[in-house]
Amino acid sequence: MEDVLNRLTVLVNSPSLRIDKAQAVAEVIKAARAYRWVGLYDVTLEEVAAIAWTGSDAPAYPRFPVTKGLSGAAVATRVPVVVQDVMTDPRYLTAFGSTRAEAIFPVAVAGRVVGTIDVESDRTNAFSRADEEFLKTCTSILTPLWVLTTPRCVLRPIGAGDARPLHDLWSSPAVRRFLWDDEVIPLARTRAVIDQNQRMFGDRGVGLWGVWPADSPNLGGFAGLWPFRDPPDVELLYGVSEHLWGRGYATEVAQAVIAYCFDSFDIPVVRASTDAANTASIRVLGKLGFGFVRRSTVGDLDTVFYELHRRARSRASS
């Protein structure tokens, strides 16, 4: 089994799109123990949503409320839920009519469940102690599929279940001042951004991550790459809640995103821009090693542009 675990380690850390890695991981887990079906899911505050699964048939519930089903029980307790006969458990949500046994193993980081591994069998009493040990080990190995981590934060791709806390953050006066030019955007616009974000992670493997400080259950910020202007140019974007200002959080989470981009993808340069009046953001870019490129007016805004080249980061870290 060690060779299977090694293969999973290589897969989850490979420079591939997240959805492709998840698909390959699910297939490896399925083949390793001859399971009938394996699915990997994201978990947000509001819902459980499928990332990838084995075979061509999608589960009957590709997304459902976080309180429902066996997954809801695993998320609430943060411990695996193994049901050897699903016909006897009223919590079971039918994914496939042929399922007889199901096991849900939560992936938790800093006490917060960020994903699940869902394994199903067409036999009752299908899961042995060896299966449980194997799947528990998988949850540890596969953590990078769900999150980036820093010394003080957990970063997870922003999903539909994060709409309200993200909207609250983006509507706060201190954050919206430069992010939305002081406009209080409608919740529908936040949801539209999240929809685009999920497409970006599926198509390109990058987008916006939500930031959760390890000592708090509340969304504390966001960081990632986002398209700006026409034609679109992808740039670094970050922000943290005002109560975290002046404590190095923005620099910390932006560094994690930059490392991910340079280490996982063939990106030669990361670009960034900000309002010339946003001195705090300019200081962060300086700490990150970005170099000034130009200053120009974009629309009615006095804007400064910066770049960080892969080779410059490599020299700085060597």
Image (tube, grey):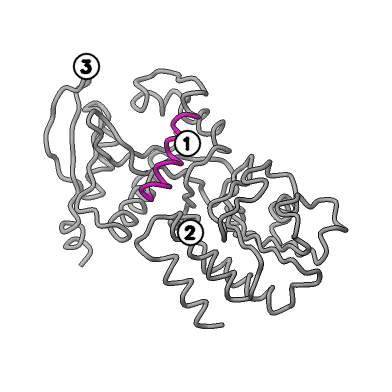
User: Crowding near pointer 2: few (<14 within 10 Å), some, many (20+)?
Assistant: many
Write down the residue under mark 3: 300
Quarter containing the C terminus:
bottom left
> What is the span of residues highlighted in magenta in the rendered image?
191-205
Count every numbered label the image shows and give the total. 3
Secondary structure of the residue carrying tag 2 is: helix
> 47 or 101: nearer the eye?
101
Residue 38 in the image, given as x and y percentages of width and height: 61, 62
**Residue 63: x percent and y percent?**
63, 43
42 or 148, which is in the foreground? 42
Picture quarter with the N terminus: bottom right
Mark 1 element type: helix
In the image, is 102 to the left or to the right of 318? right
Q: Name the side, left or right, on which 54 lies relative to 152.
A: right
Distance (Cα) linking label 3 and label 2: 40 Å
In this figure, which residue is indicated by the disc labeled 1? Answer: 243
Quadrant in the picture for residue 183: top left
Going from N to C along the chain, the mark reached first, 3 or 2, is 2
Q: Residue at x 81, y 51 (%)?
A: 91
Residue underneath mark 2: 145
Rendering coords of residue 253 (x, y %) = 39, 49
Please tell me whether the stretch drawn in magenta is mainly helix, strand or loop: helix
Q: Is residue 155 above or below residue 45?
A: below
In this view, the residue in front, 135 or 53, is 53
Query: Does the magenta segment cover residue 104?
Result: no
